[in-house]
Amino acid sequence: MKSSSPIAAATGPDGPPEARPEGAQGAPSGERAQTPRRRPPRRHARVIIGSIIAIALLAGGYTAACATAALPDPQITLSPELSSGGPEGLVIDVGPVQELVDGQQGPSAVGWSEGTEVWSNSDRPRPIASITKVVTALVCLEQQPIAAGTDGAVHTWTEADAARANAYAEQGGVTFPIPVGTRVTAKQMLTMMLLPSANDFAAAYAVSVFGSEDAFAAAAQTWAAKNGLTSLQIFEPTGMDEYNVSTAADLVRLGRLAMANPTVSEITRLPSANMPWGIGTVKSSNPLLRKGNGILGIKTGSTSAAGYALLSAEHQDVDGRDMIRFSAVLQRETTDERRDSSWALLDGMGKLAVTQEYVQKDQVVGSARTIDGAKIDLLATKTVSAGLVPGEQASIAAKPGTIHVGKAGQRAGTAHLRSPAGSTEIPIVTKQAIEDPGLWWRMTHPRELFGK
């Protein structure tokens, strides 16, 4: 049943009008309803804060990555004269030495102790006269060496030795007769045959070693072939036979073999020697020994068929390297001509040696570029040179190393000068310190730093 109470009708089911919220349905006419203000949800704030943190973390990680990234090694570039094998002119021209030989009127040849090259103006074998005795000495010493500190085997002078001496004297050959039964050492026979050019001692020595002149001659031909002396023909040990022949070039090669033998080289450089048996002082027949202290012999020769011949050797210092220069002259008309020809060749050879400086200490021999474009000079740490004679060559080459951020003086590579004297190492170092480009550069150059 509905109530008809005035109060109930006035309040209605929801209570009195003053109890309703403002703006609620049923508000007095003419009044606008208002919506209450709401606060943003907390979820949005968390997203914003998280984004800020993520950005900060990313920025910090990038900074850290930039700060700790390893820098690429500086790029090293060596100077062309190092990296390409050396400057021009490392091979010494042989033209001047050939011109020196070609300027001689008679058969001539020259060469140095280093290498195998020989320069000659004639390929025709000629009689070599007493230069044969150098062959005799080397062939006999190979068959019967003389131990260091001794005078070698002892030979007793025979009737056959005396008879040969008489025969050589009748032919105008050099002899020093001694009594039959005299005891003579190998060293004494070598001295007599190589200094005053005694034919009798040369023959006695060859026969004492090989038993006969024919056996010696056969051994000499085998020896010549083994040592590449293709033009050399030996039929007896003294050189009195005009069929003992050689080219001047092969005589230079013979000189090299003689100077490599300690017994022969010791004797041939002597200007004189004192001998027993009443012989007394004998003098070398080599006129060049009176020219200077550098002359090392080797042997003269003269017969009517050979004319005047001379095989010579002289010491030469080439930038601290001990060398020997050789000359051989054949078919000269006088003793003065063979002396002057030999001296002109040896003296001219001495002027053809070249000492070339390839790198100086503290010379800039390259550069390095750092990642940020800085240039670092690279320096050689020593001065190196090489002394060369015609036909010789030297080369210089280098390999780069690895350098990093650090102080000056880092090893940036190594160069080597290679010459007949050997190999010389030249360390290459940095002139300046290599600096880190800094954090800001690192952060602003990611492509250079990370390769992207």
Image (spheres, grey):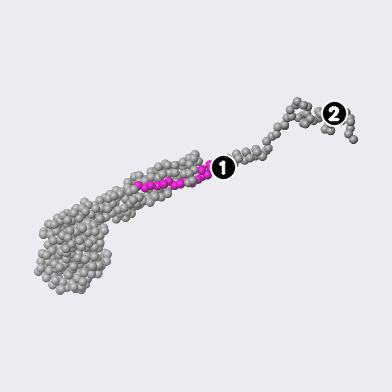
Helix, strand or loop at label 1? It is helix
Which circle marks residue 58 in the picture?
A: 1
Residue 219 is left or right of residue 34, and the answer is: left
Q: Give how far across and how far down residue 134 sits, in percent.
A: 20, 64
Q: Which residues are magenta?
A: 61-79
Q: From the viewer's side, name the closer residue of 346 and 430.
A: 430
Tell me which amino acid carries mark 1.
Answer: Leu
Q: Give how far across and how far down residue 418 sits, in percent.
A: 32, 54
Q: Give how far across and how far down residue 409 sits, in percent.
A: 40, 45
Does 397 lie within the magenta span?
Answer: no
> Hey, which quadrant is residue 43 in on the image?
top right
Tell me, yes or no, if residue 27 can be seen here.
yes
Which circle marks residue 10 in the picture?
A: 2
Q: Which mark is first along the chain, 1 or 2?
A: 2
Q: Residue at x 14, y 58 (%)?
A: 106
Q: From the viewer's side, name the closer residue of 359 and 87.
A: 87
Tell me which amino acid carries mark 2.
Answer: Ala
Residue 172 is left or right of residue 38, and the answer is: left
